[in-house]
């Protein structure tokens, strides 16, 4: 079996998660990493877990010379520059077979389009890493319900939620560096999965045409004085000056181009879910059938009482974003596989070794960015946005949400004061 030599650009939380997932992926070796911090730790982790003889490189160019594909796991605000460096390395002779970018593709449509154009200019196959579409539970329900869909018709309503207590890194809380708040961070997941599961079996990813979006953004927890101070003390980000949304919800309407039928995808996301930890909740309703996925339903539960809790050092050993180390804990033995990281890496491996784009390419990532930006526009204007309006389509090309500009107080009102 031909092997893919993979290099990471970035060594933070998501890079560590992806390196963990590589333990379950055949035919891929993590051979190098470039990052401003954390490189040595990630390289040591890779060697310790047997996922590759990972070397630390001093530049993007040197990394690209020594691998077959690179994955951009660096912060959102440096991705255009980093992909530009990858493109320059290819121009200088690096023989890359593909490039990966973690969600979201860009902080806005302009940035996402820049990344698409850079990859095209370098003639690089692309993979947009949206892990939830690759979840085994999602793929299994599609397979199980395929014959039902053909008889009864496709799903007409999808609902998706991703919620946890908030990001790890300070830059993620900063709307000017991240590109917004929770709608940018996690809304991209929920919007993508809704569109995906509503798409009739056998049709292309973007077969359903986005028709309208109505969304709300709010600052419900982290704008309160107590929590605002905690956030400032922990991250240095001041939500009294540059607040971001910690809650977002909305509805995207899609049109079937062949039948004219309208279908709906509801999304809900928050950074204020103070329960067991990260929760992914999805369901879909069709005529006479349905599915439901809840990532907190685990075959393993653990109870830790108050007296024993002093011995527990890491709450996240049970579940990503967990905020508790005692009580009744839901434990997922293999989160990397549960959330789809293993499958998206396998998909990228197969695609790049075959010289083609992955299932989700950067053009698809650009479309998801458009929908997220349209959600912010809807929240600002407090009305439904017509996604078929040429004027709206043109506006989205250069639109930057007020929240991402550091003007969230104008949108979030007294919540951000």
Image (cartoon, rainbow, N blue to C red):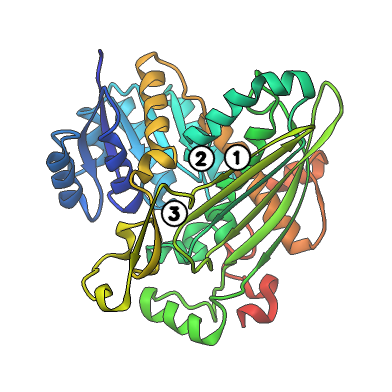
**Residue where numbered disc 1 is placed:** 193
Q: Is residue 188 left or right of residue 309?
A: right
Above or below, 203 relative to 45: above
> Foreground mark, 2 or 3?
2
> Foreground mark, 3 or 1?
1
Residue drawn 30% across and 58% down? 317
Q: Earlier in the sequence, mark 2 or mark 3?
A: 3
Residue 344 position within the rendered picture, expressed as x and y whole percent measured from the top left: 42, 32
Of residues 295 and 17, the one nearer the viewer is 295
Of residues 174 and 188, the one nearer the viewer is 188
**Residue where numbered disc 3 is placed:** 77
Q: Earlier in the sequence, mark 3 or mark 1?
A: 3
Residue drawn 43% across and 49% down? 298
Above or below, 94 relative to 220: above
Q: Crowding at label 1, few (<14), some or many (≥20) Cα neighbours within 10 Å?
A: many
Q: Is residue 14 left or right of residue 106?
A: left
For residue 132, which numbered disc appears in the image? Answer: 2
Residue 313 position within the rendered picture, expressed as x and y whole percent measured from the top left: 23, 68
How far is the residue under mark 1 from the one under mark 2? 7 Å
- Can residue 364 be seen in the rendering of this structure? yes
Q: Crowding at label 3, few (<14), some or many (≥20) Cα neighbours within 10 Å?
A: some
Residue 98 position within the rendered picture, expressed as x and y whole percent measured from the top left: 37, 25
- Can residue 399 be seen in the rendering of this structure? no
Marks 1,2: beta carbons within 8 A: yes
Residue 47 position within the rendered picture, expressed as x and y whole percent measured from the top left: 13, 39
Above or below, 32 relative to 17: above
Question: In which quadrant of the rendered image does the N terminus lie?
Answer: top left
For residue 48, which numbered disc appears in the image? Answer: none
């Amino acid at each position: 079996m031909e092997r893919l030599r993979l290099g990471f650009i970035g060594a933070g939380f998501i890079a560590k998660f992806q390196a963990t997932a590589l333990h379950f992926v055949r035919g891929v070796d993590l051979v190098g990493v470039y990052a401003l911090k954390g490189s040595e730790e990630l390289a040591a982790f890779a060697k310790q877990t047997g996922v590759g003889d990972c070397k630390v490189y001093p530049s993007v160019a040197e990394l690209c010379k020594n691998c077959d594909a690179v994955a951009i796991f660096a912060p959102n605000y440096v991705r255009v520059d980093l992909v530009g460096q990858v493109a320059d390395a290819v121009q200088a002779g690096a023989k890359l077979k593909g490039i990966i970018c973690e969600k979201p593709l860009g902080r806005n449509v302009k940035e996402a389009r820049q990344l698409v154009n850079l990859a095209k200019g370098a003639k690089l196959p692309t993979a947009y890493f949206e892990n939830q579409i690759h979840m085994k539970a999602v793929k299994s329900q599609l397979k199980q319900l395929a014959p039902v869909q053909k008889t009864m018709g496709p799903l007409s309503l999808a609902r998706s939620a991703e919620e946890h207590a908030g990001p790890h890194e300070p830059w993620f809380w900063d709307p000017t560096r991240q590109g917004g708040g929770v709608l940018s961070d996690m809304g991209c997941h929920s919007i993508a999965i809704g569109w995906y599961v509503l798409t009739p079996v056998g049709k292309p990813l973007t077969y359903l045409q986005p028709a309208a979006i109505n969304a709300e953004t709010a600052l419900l927890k982290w704008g309160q004085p107590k929590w605002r101070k905690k956030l400032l003390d922990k991250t240095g980000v001041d939500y009294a000056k540059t607040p971001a949304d910690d809650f977002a919800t909305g509805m995207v309407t899609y049109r079937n181009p062949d039948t004219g039928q309208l279908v709906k995808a509801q999304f809900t996301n928050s950074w204020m879910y103070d329960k067991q930890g990260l929760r992914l909740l999805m369901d879909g309703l069709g005529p006479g059938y349905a599915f439901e996925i809840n990532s907190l339903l685990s075959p393993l539960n653990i109870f830790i009482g108050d007296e024993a809790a002093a011995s527990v050092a890491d709450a996240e050993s049970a579940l990503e974003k967990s905020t508790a180390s005692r009580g009744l804990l839901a434990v997922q033995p293999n989160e990397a596989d549960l959330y789809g990281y293993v499958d998206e890496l396998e998909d990228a491996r197969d695609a790049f070794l075959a010289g083609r784009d992955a299932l989700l390419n950067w053009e698809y990532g650009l479309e998801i960015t458009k929908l997220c930006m349209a959600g912010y526009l809807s929240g600002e204007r407090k009305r439904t946005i017509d996604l078929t309006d040429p004027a709206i389509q043109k506006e989205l090309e250069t639109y930057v949400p007020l929240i991402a500009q550091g003007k969230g107080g104008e949108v979030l009102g007294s919540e951000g004061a």
